[in-house]
Amino acid sequence: MSGQRIPYMQDKTKDERFFILTLIAIAKEMLHGGYFPPATDIDLAVGLPLAHFAKMREAFTKYLKRGEVIFNFNDMTTVINIKNVFV
């Protein structure tokens, strides 16, 4: 990791960086709750600035709703199934 902030991007669906940050947030929430399952279903509630909501809502939903995702976090592997995305 570079330690540098990601520059502002109006359209966060242009690359994978924001999705990876979302996976990190999911993993941290699971660990904070004391549960890091080998597999689980996830519903995401996410926000967009009001100025971009109408234009970006559909693309942002599609960007995040990927179904089954396998990832590692701190040497632990999990499979999450992103079932619903609420923007």
Image (tube, rainbow, N blue to C red):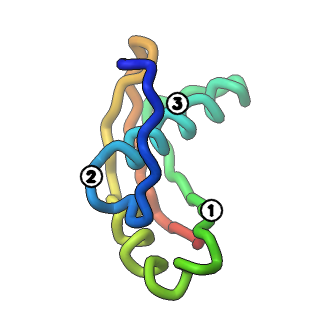
**Residue marked by disc 3:** 37
Please state the horizontal and vertical placement of residue 11, each as a whole percent of the image.
38, 65
- Please tell me in which quadrant of the rendered image residue 59 appears: bottom left
Residue in the image at 52% along x and 30% along y: 37
- The amino acid at mark 3 is Pro
Q: Residue lying farthest right?
A: 33
Q: Tell me the quarter of the image containing the C terminus.
A: bottom right
Please state the horizontal and vertical placement of residue 22, each as a whole percent of the image.
48, 44
Say what secondary structure mark 3 lies in: loop
- The amino acid at mark 1 is Ala
Q: Crowding at label 3, few (<14), some or many (≥20) Cα neighbours within 10 Å?
A: some
**Residue 15 sits above or below residue 59 on the image:** above
Say what secondary structure mark 2 lies in: loop
**Residue marked by disc 2:** 15
Which label sits on residue 45?
Answer: 1
Do callouts 1 and 2 mark residues in contact (Cβ within 8 Å)? no
Front disc: 3 or 1: 1
Residue in the image at 42% along x and 81% along y: 58
Q: Which of 68 and 26 is in front in this view?
A: 26
Please state the horizontal and vertical placement of residue 72, each as a whole percent of the image.
36, 24
**Residue 47 sits above or below residue 30 on the image:** below
N-terminal label among 3 and 1: 3
Front disc: 2 or 3: 2
- The amino acid at mark 2 is Asp
Distance from label 3 to label 1 (Cα)? 20 Å
Which label sits on residue 1?
Answer: none
